[in-house]
Image (tube, rainbow, N blue to C red):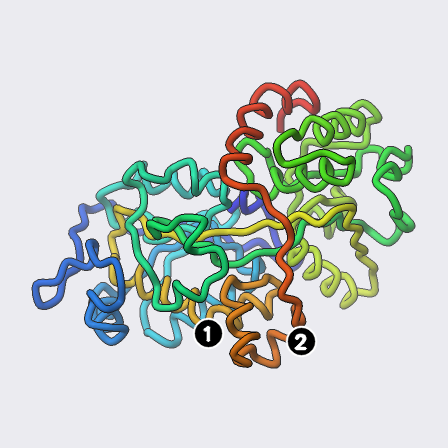
Amino acid sequence: MSISKITRGSLAATLVVALAIPVIQSSPASAAGRDFSKVTSAAQAGGLAGLEAACKKEGQLNVIALPLYWANYGDMIDGFKKKYGVKIDEANPEGSSQEEIDAAVTNKGTKRSPDVFDLGLAVAVKYLNTGTYAPYKVRTWNNLQGASTVDPTAQFTPNYTGTMTIGYSGTLGTITKLEDLLDPKFKGKIALNGDPLGSSAAMNGIYMINKALGGTFDDVSKGVAFFAKLKAAGNFINVNPTEATIASGQTPVVIDNGYLQAGVVKQFAKIGKVWKMFTPASVGSTYNSAISAWAPHPACARLWMEYTLGETGAEVWAVGGATPTLWVHLLKTKRATAAGLASIGKSKIVAEAATSAQTAAARAYLKTAWPAAVGTN
């Protein structure tokens, strides 16, 4: 979901599974006269049993921009396939949130179109009330942190969050303050996760730097000015960092989501290397689930929402280092799993994040300010 999700590879290998289904016209799934493309809750679908039966008849789910290493999506996809016995087609795993929407629009009315999205807030809000999403409230809706305030219409639903950080190779010493990044030893080494005009991770990276410098979510000019300094010093590079570029040493300093950086720490440790993290300010990065209004497999799309936003999905995300929006409820009801607790702990604190309005305003400013500061990818 570059971004967000970023354009990435894998420390082991990059898995890119393109949709290879013939382009044919699709029609909404229905069972017993029920049009699942219009269903807005499991109750309207005959419960989970009704969704499952209809999904099995559809036989497939189309996902997009879900890198297998991102927030443990590899296990999420495998778990859904195993539980429901349907095929999952994975398009453009390294794609951005904007590319998810673009793919849905381009393939509208065909079996190739994505069924579900995983979007950064900026892009999710951009298409709110445009007919792009199919509203759907999962059974856990009332227990999902932020769901009722982010989008009470349930066109998209906050699913998991993390904290932005700066990850870097241990060979570079130890970063103790933001100004350390201006040191000549970082020449040609610092990368941001994507383009902030289309990447939520990149946008949140700017927010983090900006906040560390005393800026606010209403004015990111201090953050942009700092990146301009990094560029002028030759330290910032317009390269989208991937696990492959990290492994090769091309991008030894990466501003990105903390749960991804934690994964790099573990991977480096396995091969006897050190990857460190420095967080100059606490800024959250939340993603959102949504169903495409043109989903060719509408029952499977809704079943996927129930699966990922339920307790099973929450554990999968937690094990991957991301904090599911169901986490506070699971802690309160003592239903959080041992594996999840071991990964992300018992903290109920969610890092401060920009509102959709603040993000939209920042994007408008960055449209000209960002290229002027650092150029383009």
Mark 2 burial class by Cα count in 10 Å: few <14, some 14-19, many 20+: few
Q: Could you tell me how far apart the alpha carbons at marks 1 and 2 are, in whole angstroms?
A: 16 Å
Quadrant of the image for the C terminus?
A: top right
Tell me the tag on residue 312: 1
At horizontal 64% and vertical 61% (from top left) the residue drawn is: 349
Residue 184 occupies quadrant: top right
- The front one of 347 and 367 is 347
Q: Earlier in the sequence, mark 1 or mark 2?
A: 1
Q: Is residue 308 above or below residue 128?
A: below
Q: Is residue 19 visible?
A: no
In what element is the residue under mark 2? helix
Amino acid type at circle 2 is Ala
Q: Is residue 35 visible?
A: yes
Residue 343 x, y percent position in the rendering: 66, 71
Mark 1 burial class by Cα count in 10 Å: few <14, some 14-19, many 20+: some
Residue 67 x, y percent position in the rendering: 53, 55
- The front one of 41 and 71 is 41
Tell me the tag on residue 90: none
At horizontal 66% and vertical 47% (from top left) the residue drawn is: 283
Q: Which residue is mark 2?
A: 342
Q: As drawn, is 338 to the left or to the right of 292?
A: right
- The front one of 12 and 27 is 27
Amino acid type at circle 1 is Thr
